[in-house]
Amino acid sequence: MLFNVVIAALTVAFPKEGARLPAVDSCYVIGAAPEAAGGAISVQGKSVSVYRTGAWSAFVPVVEGSNTISVVCGAETNLVGFSVAAKPKKTAAGAEEASAKSARREKLPYAAPSFQGRPIGKAPFEIVIALDPGHGGKDTGALSPHGFPEKDANLRTARETKKALEKLGYNVVMTRDDDTFVELYDRPKAAHSSRYDAFVSIHHNAPPVDRDPALVRYGSVYVWDGADQLLARAVADALAKEFDGELPSKGVLSANFAVTRSTQVPSCLVEVDFITSPQGEEAVWNAVRRRRTGKAIARGIDAWVKGAVSAPAGNISKNKEKQQK
């Protein structure tokens, strides 16, 4: 296996025992089988194939209230109990709440109204790039089938990106360089107060609970509505080129992620891969793959600095897969 661990027992990474899911009619289930499983596992009585790493994924119907999922591997059975929220009734108050939520799509409170743009005329050693490894500490982010947290994948990838950028001569500041929890709105704050040249947040994706992880896997780069797209386009293009034929790319998408809501500092959020799928997990925890990812992100940032990226044609697509980060 790639992970330097031996899975001795059947595990379910999602949903966790006692989890409370939103109002959905179905949800994904992911986990890992022991090496001795021989590829035989069933979820809710339905046979599920086991990937070469022992990872597996399934998609099951659920009901409002209490649910129990049965996962069987040989003589071992795991029963996972969780609850599903009731579907909200459409009321005037609900419409009011939705309107208030939409109003929260404002820029970061400390972001200046004027846009810095690309650092034209600066040498690399004069340029400061802020890298933000998403999540950390008590905030694990998404979990892979083996239960490895997204926060660790983000940090390892950000470290590779930092190395690659420094080899190109850039100054790099990390919002965290260990397993530390950083408040969401504190992550981009230094980039704005110190007028850094760019802010890039690094994440690994997970589908909404009601999407089948076996059908959702791609790379993408996100910007805020109305934000400058050149930095995101350069990074997305570099990643798409690096992993052409290995991982589909959705290019640049728009989303209301808090860390990118800037009118000041060029900002984007990179979703490297889907950590929830067996194939995505395998790629995420492969050291060579992480190095390639870090170098590609660095090449994209370098291309943006040098103006070697064309303005995108048309409007960017709205994100339909992710919740706010």
Image (spheres, rainbow, N blue to C red):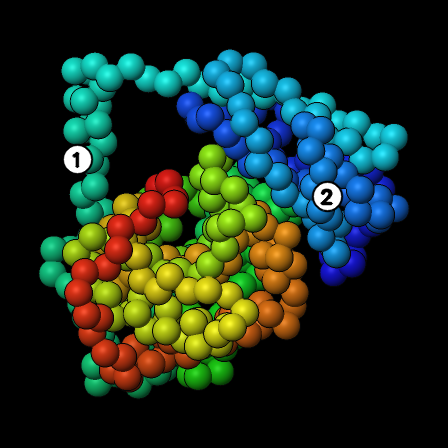
The nearer-to-camera label among 1 and 2 is: 2
Q: Is residue 120 visible?
A: yes
- Disc 1/disc 2 C-alpha distance (Å): 41 Å
Q: Residues within 10 Å of mark 2 (few under 14, many from 20)?
A: many
Label 2 element class: strand
Q: Name the kind of residue labelled 2 in the image.
A: Ala
Report the residue marked by disc 1. 103
Q: Is residue 164 left or right of residue 2?
A: left
Name the quadrant containing residue 106. Answer: top left
Q: Name the kind of residue labelled 1 in the image.
A: Ala
**Are the residues tagged 1 and 2 within 8 Å (C-beta)?**
no
Task: Report the front residue among 68 and 189.
Answer: 68
Counting from the top left corner in percent of width and height, residue 99 is at: 17, 29
The residue located at (41%, 16%) in the rendering is 86
- Quarter of the image containing the C terminus? top left
Q: Is residue 278 left or right of residue 204?
A: right
The residue located at (65%, 65%) in the rendering is 286
- Quarter of the image containing the N terminus? bottom right
Q: Is residue 147 visible?
A: no
Counting from the top left corner in percent of width and height, residue 163 is at: 52, 74
Report the residue marked by disc 2. 32
Label 1 element class: helix
Name the quadrant containing residue 307. Answer: bottom left
Q: Give the vertical position of 301 relative to 250 (above or below).
A: below
